[in-house]
Image (spheres, rainbow, N blue to C red):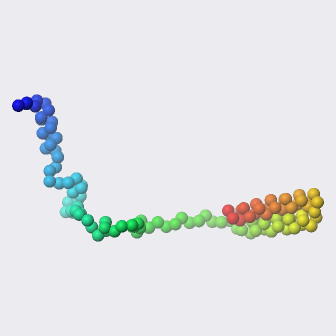
Amino acid sequence: MMRMPRVLVIPFVIALSLIPFGRTLAQGTLAQGTRASVGPTIAKAAVGVHVDRGSAMTPAALPKRQEDRKNVAMMIVGGAALIVGAIIGDTPGTIIMVGGAGVGLYGLYKYLE
């Protein structure tokens, strides 16, 4: 029969004595007087997506929009410039139409932003 040296046996016995027999790790972490739930529960038997009502989140407030009057006015001026440029015609009318389109589109961009 083979004998184990005491240097190996003593640390092994000390390590075994520190292990808590008869208690599970989950039960050992609970407070005194409470018991861990063993087995299936009604709450855990449900399937599907569950909404956590405990941490109700409120939606973030939208940033306040600046007044839309300036943006609407820019769109109106741009549209008027398109009409005036079409009436004038030729190269000067085209330049006015392109400028009016730029002003109107910028006003639309700021309005939708």
Label tally:
0
Which quadrant of the structure image shows residue 14?
top left
Which quadrant of the structure image shows residue 82?
bottom right
Assign the C terminus to one quadrant of the image.
bottom right
Q: Is residue 71 above or below residue 10?
A: below
Q: Residue 29 placed where, x, y %?
A: 24, 55
Left or right: where 107 falls relative to 99? left
Residue at 52 percent of width and 66 percent of height: 59
Residue at 13 percent of width and 30 percent of height: 7
Assign the N terminus to one quadrant of the image.
top left
Q: Residue 5 placed where, x, y %?
A: 10, 29
In this view, which residue lies farthest toward the front?
1
Left or right: where 29 falls relative to 17? right
Q: Residue 18 placed where, x, y %?
A: 16, 44
Residue at 78 percent of width and 66 percent of height: 75
Residue at 82 percent of width and 67 percent of height: 79
Q: Residue 33 placed where, x, y %?
A: 19, 63
Which quadrant of the structure image shows residue 10?
top left
In this view, which residue lies farthest toward the left?
1
Left or right: where 68 falls relative to 64? right
Left or right: where 36 falls relative to 17? right
